[in-house]
Image (cartoon, rainbow, N blue to C red):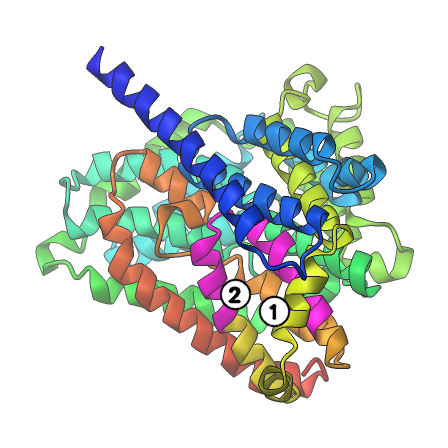
């Protein structure tokens, strides 16, 4: 009874805070903001609070925001509903269906067990395996949440097998490896994170800049290659283990037993691997055939579920998490409406002061400024999708006011919003790792701070070298 009462009070308090946030934004913004712009900014604040505190499911919050935009008439209904017709939405839907289909086979489990059997018997190899498994999955499973959900049972099995005690460095290292490995797995693969997809969509819509799957990989793979060993090394140093806890022969034995349980590689797994390679091949060759990544993903879904051709059952594959679909569609609509209402333009005009315009005239300096701003903004607006759809249009508008090519700073803003290490609400991998009860928010603070600094420095290094060499900066 007390627990229910406490939950009710938290729900009421969350809604009260969200409504208060709406009215504060509406009444405190200066008259330079039009009424639709004030309303839209208030709706964004309400959504941010509800998504951060999550008193109700994220999909229900999305519907409430959609209704508020419609009822308050902040833009034409065609603009408000446009997020549902975006190719980005269909890419996420198809990606989730692909992930469900892949999970119908033992392919991911077999891959994870094989890697852990080979390298997981020592601390360095164990942590590296947990991180690397998610990087491999990123090419085939276009959702950080799904990738983390697949690796968490494996991580829990490892913790149980090695008897990692609550609060121990080993347990913290493993679970942070799950969380941070999931975060950085979205770096170089455009389809691997919602934030990436949103960034590409917003740059196309508001700046007329198209970024293909291959181009995203080409721009970001050096940063990805830096972050993988950097995060691995950071966690090893922050959570040292005594020598007697650095060797786990039981993991090799457990993984070997699990592989035997799966039996030999079957026809389903082979078909799944062939189709996945075909899909990735189409994504990489987008500049040649011109098909949007959503089209490629939908082709993959059809092949995987087509009777006599595929291996997955349609009735199972179609049962996806529509909370995520609603979240993406409505946040896209928020971004479009935020611009259409004039809110993004007004905010960009406030930012377009002389000293700031002078500061971002230097391409490298603009990357540094936007990287830091995006990290701070992401701490305030914890939801990645919301952070991207609010920040990227503003950054694009500021770049256009300054007479700059919006590609590099718009791209940097979206990419940086992916990296949320400190707070559990900053990313789905953090939330899922924390939801297991095996790690606390406190455990994220110190490693998250260092990981954030490392990521900012790595981005600046890549911008000053690789991006400069290829002409992006």
Please tell me how crowded label 2 is: few (under 14), some (14-19), or many (20+) other residues with Cα within 10 Å: many
Say whether residue 257 is visible: yes
Location of residue 213 in the rendering, given as x and y in whole percent from the top left corner: 73, 58
**Magenta region:** 372-398
Asked where in the image residue 464 lies, by quadrant, the reply is bottom right
Q: Looking at the image, is mark 1 or mark 2 earlier in the sequence?
A: 2
Where does label 2 land, which residue?
374
Q: Nearer the viewer, residue 217 or 83?
A: 83
Q: Which mark lies nearer to you, 1 or 2?
A: 2
Residue lying at 78% horizontally and 48% vertically, measured from the top left: 293
Q: How many marks?
A: 2
Q: Position of residue 261 (x, y in %)?
A: 41, 25
Residue 100 visible, this orientation: no
Magenta stretch encompasses residue 359: no
Residue 181's place in the image compared with 349, above or below, is above
In this picture, residue 368 sits left or right of residue 16: right
Q: Residue at the top extreme?
A: 1
* Residue 383 picture location, percent across and down: 50, 47
In the rendered image, the vertical position of residue 223 relative to residue 273, given as above or below: below
Q: Position of residue 415 (x, y in %)?
A: 58, 63
The answer to the question of whether label 1 and label 2 lie on touching residues, with beta carbons closer than 8 A, is yes
Q: Residue at x 54, y 40 (%)?
A: 47
Closer-to-camera residue (81/308): 81
Hey, which quadrant is residue 167 in on the image? top left
* Helix, strand or loop under label 1: helix
Give the residue drawn at x 48%, y 49%.
134
Quadrant of image for the C terminus:
bottom right
* Residue that carries the numbered disc 1 in the rendered image: 412
Q: Residue furthest right?
A: 289
Q: Is residue 443 left or right of residue 35?
A: left
């Amino acid at each position: 009874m007390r627990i229910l009462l406490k939950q009710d009070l938290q729900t009421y308090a969350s809604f009260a805070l969200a409504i208060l946030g709406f009215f504060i934004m509406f009444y405190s913004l200066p008259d330079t903001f039009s009424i639709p712009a004030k309303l839209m900014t208030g709706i964004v604040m309400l959504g941010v609070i509800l998504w951060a505190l999550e008193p109700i499911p994220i999909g229900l919050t999305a519907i409430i925001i959609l209704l508020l935009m419609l009822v308050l008439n902040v833009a034409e209904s065609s603009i408000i509903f446009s997020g549902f017709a975006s190719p980005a939405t269909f890419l996420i839907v198809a990606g989730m269906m692909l992930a469900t289909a892949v999970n119908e086979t033992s392919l991911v489990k077999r891959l994870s067990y094989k890697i852990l059997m080979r390298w997981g018997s020592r601390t360095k190899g164990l942590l590296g395996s947990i991180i690397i498994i998610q990087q491999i999955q990123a090419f085939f499973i276009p959702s950080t949440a799904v990738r983390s959900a697949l690796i968490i049972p494996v991580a829990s099995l490892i913790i149980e097998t090695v008897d990692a005690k609550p609060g121990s460095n080993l347990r913290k290292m493993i679970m942070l490896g799950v969380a941070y490995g999931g975060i950085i797995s979205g770096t170089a693969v455009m389809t691997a994170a919602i934030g990436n997809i949103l960034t590409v969509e917003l740059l196309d819509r508001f700046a007329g800049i198209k970024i293909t799957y291959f181009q995203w990989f080409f721009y970001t793979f050096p940063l990805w290659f830096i972050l993988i060993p950097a995060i691995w090394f950071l966690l090893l140093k922050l959570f040292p283990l005594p020598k007697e806890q650095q060797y786990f022969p039981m993991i090799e034995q457990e993984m070997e037993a699990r592989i035997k349980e799966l039996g030999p590689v079957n026809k389903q797994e082979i078909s799944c691997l062939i189709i996945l390679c075909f899909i990735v091949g189409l994504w990489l060759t987008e500049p040649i055939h011109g098909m949007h990544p959503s089209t490629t993903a939908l082709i993959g879904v059809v092949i995987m579920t087509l009777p006599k051709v595929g291996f997955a059952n349609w009735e199972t594959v179609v049962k996806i998490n529509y909370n995520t679909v609603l979240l993406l569609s409505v946040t896209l609509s928020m971004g479009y409406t935020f611009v259409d209402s004039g809110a993004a333009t007004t905010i960009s005009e406030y930012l377009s002061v002389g000293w700031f315009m002078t500061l971002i005239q230097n391409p490298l300096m603009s990357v540094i400024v936007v990287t830091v701003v995006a990290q701070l903004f992401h701490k305030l607006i914890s939801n990645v999708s919301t952070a991207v759809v609010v920040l990227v249009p503003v950054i694009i508008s500021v770049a256009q006011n300054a007479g700059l090519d919006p590609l590099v700073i718009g791209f940097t803003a979206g990419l940086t919003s992916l990296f949320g290490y400190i707070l559990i609400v900053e990313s789905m991998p953090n939330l899922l790792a924390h939801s297991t009860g095996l790690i606390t928010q406190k455990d994220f603070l110190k490693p998250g701070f260092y990981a954030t600094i490392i990521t900012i420095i790595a981005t600046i290094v890549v911008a000053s070298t690789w991006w400069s060499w290829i002409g992006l900066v």
